[in-house]
Amino acid sequence: MPIHLCSCCIHHCTTTPCQPARKALLPKSRALAAPKEDETYVQKVVIIGAGWGGLSTAHALSKSSSQLQITIVDAAPRVGGLVRDGFSTINNTLSTNAEAGQHGFWDNYYNIFSLLQNDLSSKISNMDEVLTGYAEQGQYSPNGLEAVWPVYRNSQPNLPTGLAQALYTKFVNLPPLDRATAAPLVLAFSEFDDSLEAWARYDNISFRDLCIKLGVSKRCYNEAFEPMILTGLFAPGAECSAAAALGMAYFFVLRSQNSFDVRWCRGNIGELIFDPWVELLKERGVRFETSTRVQGFEMDGGDSISKVMCSSTTKSDKQQEAELLSLEADTVVFGLGGASLAALVRNSPELAQYFEFRKFANLRGTGVLATRLYLDTVLDTEYSANACWGFDEGVGMTFFDITKLHGLDVAERTDGVGSIIEVDYYHAASLLVMSDEAIVEKVKKDLNTILGLQCINANVVDAAVVRLPQAVNWYSPGSYSNMPDAKSSSIVNAFFCGDLVRSRHGSWSQEKAYVSGIEAANLILSRREGSGIVPLPNDEPHVALGRSALTLVKTFVGRGDSNKAPSLVDFLW
């Protein structure tokens, strides 16, 4: 799985949360101009966070109504936050900036594909110029190549999901008998239908415990499932909700034979996707307040936010100047990751008075270490995108050949750089404390183990090291009850978007964040549920049949109510 950093974070995902604004530090102030008395009243929408969710909300709102004054607030200097380019190399010897992570677009990203092909067609002439084609992917351990994920759509004949992945995935070392021990997980996938009841059953147990109870062999778990969870949910299976793991795996891997086929961004996502998108939104009148942190809120005396108080930072003559910004709001949309939302509530008494918001303080993130090595040699990497396991206990790892994915012409370079290799680590708090030099040495050592002599003989020209503590949402056991719904139950004009929001669409990662933005816009505009959203395809016939049969059995056992019947979890625990 790729990195899907919490780009909507307004705190740069740091450990220093927002503090209440102090007037001594904020000598200037301004407010958005209100419409004149003879003008038609325009509803003011403030969106906090400029990631996939926040931009999606603004996109859907501005596309549907001109009677809205939309302002997006983000702490990062440029839209896209942490995931976009802007990180300089250690030695500052290269003119190009690094980006945190490499970004994949899976076969089920129907809504994002629609955005790129249709809504951004005036800015992006051809989606194929932005995204790569499909290609095989590798999986490595310190022992070498462990598995190859083919381009499943090219594998014939087309088979029922589950069977296709079992037969077409090329495991190099994992014995068939160990793989067969995963079969009982079919029962869990059949029962977990992404409903609220299913989340309630499976969220309080870890995915590792579920696998142990179902008899998955230790080797199968360690070599097949643990790497998937570490690079898909960014934490070990023992610390991830079984519900989240089942939902993520079904969306990315098991919804159809082609689900795991992935296309990668051909360059920095900030330049190729976010910049054209922002340009379109600005043409529609959306206003962006970047380098701006939310400091607090004003309530209208009831359960409604009337103003969002921010501090905006600008650089002038090598000095930073802070300015107080007061944004009037008829509607407020929170497009934040878990750690950022928790930090905001901790420092906002206006929000903390509500139990719904206090629950968000239980949400947390897990750390990501994103690195890029600029080598003096062109490496012959067999696969341009790879997942890895076994290099650090409890740490996920991926590496990408940026030179190949971005189609860079090494012959045209004059800086002595051959291959550019991106290596990212997840659940990486133990690595974030290392020095830049030690990190670069470790990354090079890991690549040497994987790629062998050609990499050992290569020298590092320069490197980029990006530390992102609490950067991605942590779906720990029991966390679902603390996650927000699309509409607040306590503040009447507050809404939520992002991949943390509880949704029945069934998507994950960037696609879920994008879809949640449309769902928030539908609620704001009082449109019907699902308006403007491309739904996921129905379950394949054998999956639907299995779920229907299980429901019938549970309905019989529950004397007419399937929810009263014991679940698989009840039998196992």
Image: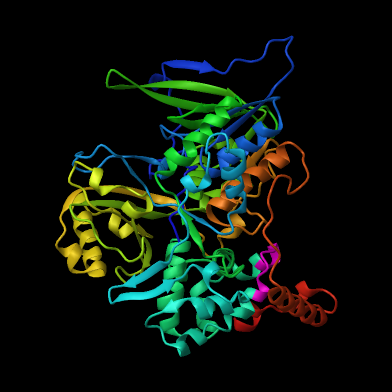
* Residue 217 left/right relative to 374: right
Left or right placement of residue 412 versus residue 187 in this view: left
* Picture colour scheme: rainbow
Q: Where is residue 213 in the image (x, y as percent from the top left)?
A: 54, 83
In the picture shown, does residue 244 fall above or below 559?
above
Q: Residue 309 versus residue 34: which sits nearer the camera?
A: 34
Q: Residue at x 41, y 70 (%)?
A: 227
Residue lying at 69% horizontally and 25% vertically, measured from the top left = 66
Q: Check the image and report above or below for 510 versus 385.
A: above
x, y percentage for residue 33? 59, 15
Q: Nearer the viewer, residue 237 or 221?
A: 221
Residue, far bottom: 177
Image quadrant in which you'd find residue 454: bottom left
> Is residue 245 a member of the stretch shown in magenta?
no
The quadrant of the rendering that contains the N terminus is bottom left
Q: Is residue 330 left or right of residue 408?
A: right
Q: Give the magenta range.
A: 190-198
Q: Quadrant of residue 522?
A: top right
Q: Which residue lies furthest to the right in this view?
A: 560
